[in-house]
Image (tube, grey):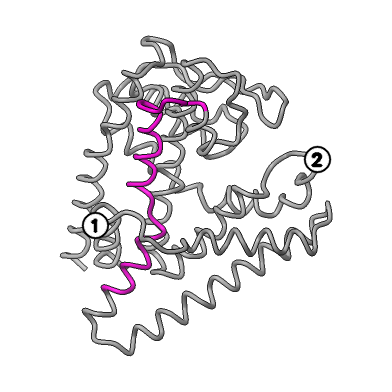
Amino acid sequence: MFFELAALAYLVDLFFGEFPCKHPVVWMGDFISAFERRFYADRILPGALLVTGLIALTLLISVTLVTLCGLLPDWLSLLILAMFASTGLAMNMLHESVAALLTADQPKQALAYLVSRDTQDMSDTDIYKAGLETWAENLSDGVIAPLFYLLLFGLPGLAVYKAINTLDSMIAYKTERYFYFGKTAAIIDDIANVIPARLTALLIVSLAQDKQRAWQCLRHDGKKMESPNAGHPIAAMAGALGVALGGDARYHGRIKHKPTLGLPVHPVDKIALTKALQMKTGINLIVLSLLTAGALLS
């Protein structure tokens, strides 16, 4: 287990955030775009080849980096690997991006950078709801899942997960263009997030003031969404805040009918989003406590 590496990487992300250089995920996105321009066809095979190629390349680069760092003194190797691993964690960036919805002069435009749904006709309630769902779902995709695979497999595990997640965010849509081309990416992402999504939901429940309501909402509504994973942290967040999330939304010009998660005990507004974002402190304390304990016991 890689507890020391994970703890240090988490601290680097918290204190320094994103480094002023081209992010590894951007390189992955460039690879995906280049492959799509050259080899796209609305069939499963080209999409599967893209998934295989990016994962293999990511694994090769990350294993090579780990091998080279193994030639250095242990303390320096740990520091370098932690700096690279921190680029796969997004607590600071995620929190800042969602918090920007509270102060942005044009919140619809700020939200458009975060979600794939259409934002131009959203009400304030729709904006805050999308912000809450993004915060909950990406706590799994951007924080807990990368940590999970970093702990299990070190830097290569985190890197491969980020490749899978990037593929999902770019081509795993049920649109006419990507229905078959992105199917392999969608399936692998679903598999990769089974455990992290549920761990994230439990983490949210543990921080809720009304833990019973959060737990009941998770159990009752967590499996309602089309995605086998996203509904769990979102349902837990809905129960924790006493709000209703989900519901119909517009994607690529079409209305997508989605179930409602939670009950509208309180409105979805700035107060609800602020309370959700305040969970960051509790999440940091729990995560760092567990990582520190693991490092001391390992």
Give whichever of 112, 80 is nearer the camera: 112
Q: Position of residue 265 (x, y in %)?
A: 37, 9
Q: Is residue 298 left or right of residue 140?
A: left
Q: Name the residue tied to disc 2.
A: 176
**Above or below for 285 versus 164:** above
Q: Position of residue 192 (x, y in %)?
A: 53, 53
Q: Is residue 171 left or right of residue 92?
A: right
Give whichever of 203, 106 is nearer the camera: 106
- Where residue 142 is drawn, which disc sits there? none
- Disc 2 versus disc 1: distance between alpha carbons? 42 Å
Q: Name the residue tied to disc 1.
A: 11
Magenta part of the chain = 79-108
Quarter of the image where the C terminus is located? bottom left
Q: Position of residue 271 (x, y in %)?
A: 31, 18
**Quadrant in the picture for residue 86:** bottom left
Q: Secondary structure at mark 1?
A: helix
**Residue drawn at x 36%, y 16% as measured from the top left:** 242
Tell me which numbered mark, 2 or 1, is placed earlier along the sequence: 1
Q: Is residue 118 left or right of residue 41?
A: left
**Residue drawn at x 62%, y 67% as measured from the top left:** 54
**Residue drawn at x 38%, y 61% as measured from the top left:** 20
Q: Amino acid at mark 1?
A: Leu
Does the stretch in magenta take in 88?
A: yes
Q: How many marks?
A: 2
Q: Is residue 202 left or right of residue 283?
A: right
**Quadrant in the picture for residue 30:** bottom right
